[in-house]
Image (cartoon, rainbow, N blue to C red):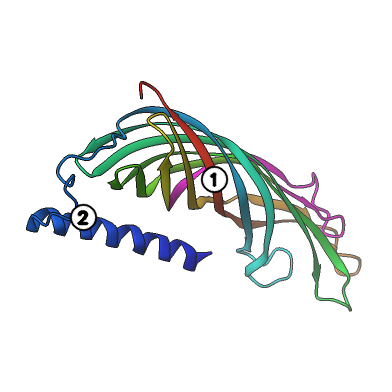
Amino acid sequence: MKKLLFVSLAFVALTVAHAASAADMGLPVKSRTLEPEWNWSGFYAGLNAGYARSTTVWNDLDGFFNGVGGVLINESSNAFIGGGQVGYNWQVRHVVIGAEADFEYLSSTHSTIFFANPPANPAFATFYDSVQWVGAVRGRAGPAIDNVLTYLTAGFAYGRVQHNITAPFFNVDPNFNLSSTKVGFTAGAGAEYALDPRWSIKAEVLYVDLGKNSPTITGVSQNQPPAGPPTVVTGRLDILDTMWIVRAGVNYKFGG
């Protein structure tokens, strides 16, 4: 997936560089170079759907679960994603600059059972993760060759996530349950093809980083006589959520 994004970015960058070079040198690549026949400027709205691969990483900073700090869980899941977008484009000769906002629902859930020091100590905990929806406000820019637009895009991303731990052996009470709206960034590349002055279809690849939660988990130790009475213990966690999205969509431009 990272190679796909790199190739897409490289293609768009080379296209922009070629267009700029041709304009600077006055090269008449086509007779209509100075006056593009297609106009991408204006408001638009549309729908999209595709594939999302979300990854959650649990980092146990204090060794609460296994006595050793570090990455505890690294799990991924595949899901359908779908939603809509609205935006506006400005076209200056063969360069299009725009802003777009989108909102997506997805069904991304995964769970992992963690065993501490098996098989001598069959302590376990179940980690459950879910991404319920994501949204973004992005800028995008790239060259337009008549009715074909290629672009880079980047901006602000946000999403609703839920993280849960069920750990009876560790006496986590109450069971850890964190639901929050996280904020991060997104970046990617895409291409759009206009079917007529109003309708267009597009495809894009996006990477989304929703940042991290840093909660503190509380539990009760398993001390038994003669070791002493149970004691309350705490541990710090970092929970990171990232996502790759590949999707296609359709847009309708108003006033076309």
Magenta segment includes 167? yes
Residue at the right extreme of this rendering: 225
Residue type at numbered disc 2? Ala
Residue at the bottom extreme of this rendering: 120
Magenta segment includes 143? no
Vertical position of residue 159 compared to residue 67: above or below: above
Relative depth, front residue between 110 and 14? 14
Q: Dots 2 and 1: beta carbons under 8 Å? A: no
Q: Which mark is residue 160?
A: none
Q: Where on the picture, by quarter, is residue 58?
A: bottom right
Residue at the top extreme of this rendering: 255
Residue 158 place in picture, x, y as percent? 51, 40
Residue drawn at (53%, 40%), measured in percent from left and top?
Answer: 249
Relative depth, front residue between 247 and 28? 28
Q: CA distance from mark 2 to mark 1?
A: 26 Å
Residue 102 shown left or right of residue 240 in the figure: left
Residue 222 place in picture, x, y as percent? 85, 63
Residue type at numbered disc 1? Ala
Residue 211 shown left or right of residue 154 in the figure: right
Q: Would you name the residue on which mark 2 appears?
A: 19
Q: Secondary structure at mark 1?
A: strand
Mark 2 or 1, nearer chain start:
2
Residue drawn at (40%, 31%), measured in percent from left and top?
Answer: 87
Mark 2 residue crowding within 10 angstroms, few (<14) / some (14–19) / many (20+): some
| Magenta-drawn stretch, dominant element (helix, strand or loop) | strand
- Residue stretch in magenta: 163-188
Q: Would you name the residue on which mark 1 appears?
A: 248
Residue at the front extreme of this rendering: 31
Residue 39 place in picture, x, y as percent? 28, 34
Vertical position of residue 97 compared to residue 72: above or below: above
Vertical position of residue 127 compared to residue 227: above or below: above
Residue 36 place in picture, x, y as percent? 22, 40
